[in-house]
Structure formats: structure tokens, C-alpha cells
Image (tube, rainbow, N blue to C red):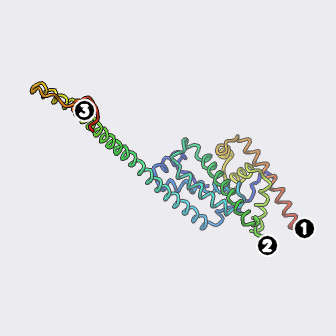
């Protein structure tokens, strides 16, 4: 996570005055969290990157409409979710029109890093959308349970439970995948 | 086991710092550009609103003035004409014609 100098209220106030530095801090602090939530919905990193960028741009454009600056993260993540769902809808239509498979089919062995990436993305399919959001926000972005609970509008206990379940399911899936690879 | 973090480095966009920085810069540039565009549009709306109000007020005043003038002109014509015909009748004893009497009483001239 990017170090926080100003409180989020101060940052939002400065952004509303149009200060480019405040915009930059907001983007640096929140782009990866936006990516995590977009990835939870879309499960395709390149799509998630595009959606995260667009969602942050939209959020900064509408920053004056945010009533309570302390709710910025939850508000932003909701924009990300909406953008991601719209994107997924468009993608599904496009894929149907083109009759394209979800991932390129290639029999050639993948480099380890790429294989691990595919296994990770495939394993994430076993999680529910909230579990994906929580495990990504916690383990990828480094948010605390308090931060996650606040942004997602759930209790800290619920956040912990979702994280525990998500990690357990992911490990089971990844380990079974790894065994399959070993057996081959 | 479930207390340990999952290794998401494979899908972490920050694993390539250069590419990540480009994304941040690109997002920032587009956000600032759109914000400026929105600010300009809002400024135009802010200016347009009072300008429209002034234009509407001017139009209203002009229209009211024209209406009042027109109605005064129309109302003023009959009493003036009636006074003139009556005065002439009283002073010279000359009877007004039927046409002018009808006109005084409000009939449209032929």
C-alpha cells in the first residue's frame, strides 16, 4: 500500500479543489484495490486493469457528488463493481458474437510463472464474488479487516471468516492442481 | 494453513513497476483531463444560466412594454374620437355620421 500522509477527508477536499497532487495520491493509493475488485468480478487481469483505470477516472470525475468523504473507499469499490459488471456484459455479448473461447487454446507447455498465473485464476473460480474481493484486498492489496469491513459494509468477523474460507478453498484447489501437474 | 497469505504475485500488476507507473500516469492524465472538461462544462452552465435569465427578463420586459403600449393605443383611440365627435356636435351642431357613431360604439370600421 502507498503511505498515507493526509486523511482521506483531506485528500478528497483537495481533490475537489482540483489539486493534481491529491488526484495522484488517490490514484496511487487506490488503483490496485480497484484492480483487485475488478479482478474479483472479471477474473481476467488485463480486463481488470482497464476497468480499474476507468472506474477511478469516473470516481474522480464525480468526486463532488460523494456525500461523506469517509465513505470514499466503499463508494469507489461500488463504482468498480458496476463498471466491471457492465464490462462483463459487453464481453459476453462480444464473445458470443465472435464465438471465441474464454482463453486461447494452446497445447504448448507454459512457462512456470504463466502456468502458476493460469492456475491461480482458474482456482479463483471456486470462490464466491465476496470471497474473491476479500482475499484479493487482504492478500494482494494488504488492507486490514477493519478497512475491508468498512469498505464492503460487513463486520470484521465476517471479513475474517470469508478470508479463512477463501484461503482454504484456494489452497485445496491449487494443491490438487499441483498434484495433477506432478502426476503428469 | 489458512492463516498464511496466498501468493498473488502472479497476478499482481505491480510486479512490473514500469508498466504499473505507466498505468498510474495514464489514469491520472485522463482523470485530470476529464475533470477539466467537466469544470469547463460546469462553468459554461453557470454562465449560461444567468445569461438565459437576463435574456428572458429582457424579452419579458420588451413584450410587456409592447403589449401595454399597444393596449393603451387601442383603448386611447375610442375615447379621443368620441370626445372629438361629441365636442364638434356640441359646438357646431353638426350631427355625426352613422358610420362614425358606430365606430365610436366599438364597431370595426368597414
The image shows a total of numbered marks equal to 3
Of labels 1 and 2, earlier in sequence is: 2
Q: What residue occupies the far bottom of the structure in this picture?
A: A108
Q: In what quadrant of the picture does the N terminus of chain A appear?
A: bottom right
Q: Is residue A121 left or right of residue A68?
A: right
- Seen at 78% across and 68% down, the residue is A115
Secondary structure of the residue carrying tag 3 is helix
Front label number (1 vs 3)? 3
Cα gap from disc 3 to disc 2, whole angstroms = 101 Å
Q: Which residue is mark 1?
A: A183
Q: Which residue is mark 2?
A: A106
- Seen at 86% across and 60% down, the residue is A176
Q: Is residue A38 left or right of residue B48?
A: right
Q: Which residue is mark 3?
A: B103
Q: Label 1 lies in what chain?
A: A
Residue A11 x %, y %? 51, 49
Amino acid at each position: 500500500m502507498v503511505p498515507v500522509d493526509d486523511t482521506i477527508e483531506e485528500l478528497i477536499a483537495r481533490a475537489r479543489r482540483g489539486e493534481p497532487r491529491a488526484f495522484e495520491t488517490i490514484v496511487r493509493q487506490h488503483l490496485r484495490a480497484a484492480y483487485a475488485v475488478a479482478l474479483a468480478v472479471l477474473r481476467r487481469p488485463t480486463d481488470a486493469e482497464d476497468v480499474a483505470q476507468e472506474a477511478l477516472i469516473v470516481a474522480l470525475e464525480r468526486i463532488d457528488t460523494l456525500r461523506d468523504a469517509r465513505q470514499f473507499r466503499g463508494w469507489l469499490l461500488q463504482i468498480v463493481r458496476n463498471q466491471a459488471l457492465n464490462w462483463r456484459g459487453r464481453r459476453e455479448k462480444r464473445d458470443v458474437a465472435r464465438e471465441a473461447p474464454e482463453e486461447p487454446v494452446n497445447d504448448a507447455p507454459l512457462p512456470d510463472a504463466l502456468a502458476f498465473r493460469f492456475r491461480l485464476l482458474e482456482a479463483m473460480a471456486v470462490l464466491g464474488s465476496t470471497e474473491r474481493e476479500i482475499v484479493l484486498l487482504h492478500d494482494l492489496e494488504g488492507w486490514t479487516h477493519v478497512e475491508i469491513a468498512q469498505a464492503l459494509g460487513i463486520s470484521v468477523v465476517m471479513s475474517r471468516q470469508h478470508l479463512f474460507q477463501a484461503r482454504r478453498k484456494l489452497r485445496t484447489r491449487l494443491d490438487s492442481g499441483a498434484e495433477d501437474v506432478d502426476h503428469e | 494453513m489458512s492463516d498464511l497469505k496466498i501468493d498473488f504475485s502472479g497476478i499482481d500488476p505491480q510486479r512490473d513497476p514500469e508498466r504499473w507507473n505507466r498505468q498510474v500516469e495514464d489514469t491520472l492524465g485522463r482523470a485530470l483531463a476529464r475533470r477539466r472538461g467537466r469544470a469547463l462544462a460546469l462553468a459554461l452552465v453557470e454562465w449560461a444560466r444567468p445569461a438565459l435569465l437576463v435574456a428572458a427578463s429582457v424579452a419579458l420586459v420588451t413584450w410587456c412594454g409592447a403589449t401595454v403600449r399597444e393596449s393603451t393605443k387601442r383603448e386611447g383611440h375610442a375615447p379621443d374620437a368620441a370626445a372629438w365627435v361629441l365636442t364638434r356636435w356640441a359646438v357646431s351642431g353638426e350631427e355625426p355620421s352613422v358610420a362614425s357613431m358606430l365606430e365610436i360604439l366599438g364597431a370595426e370600421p368597414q
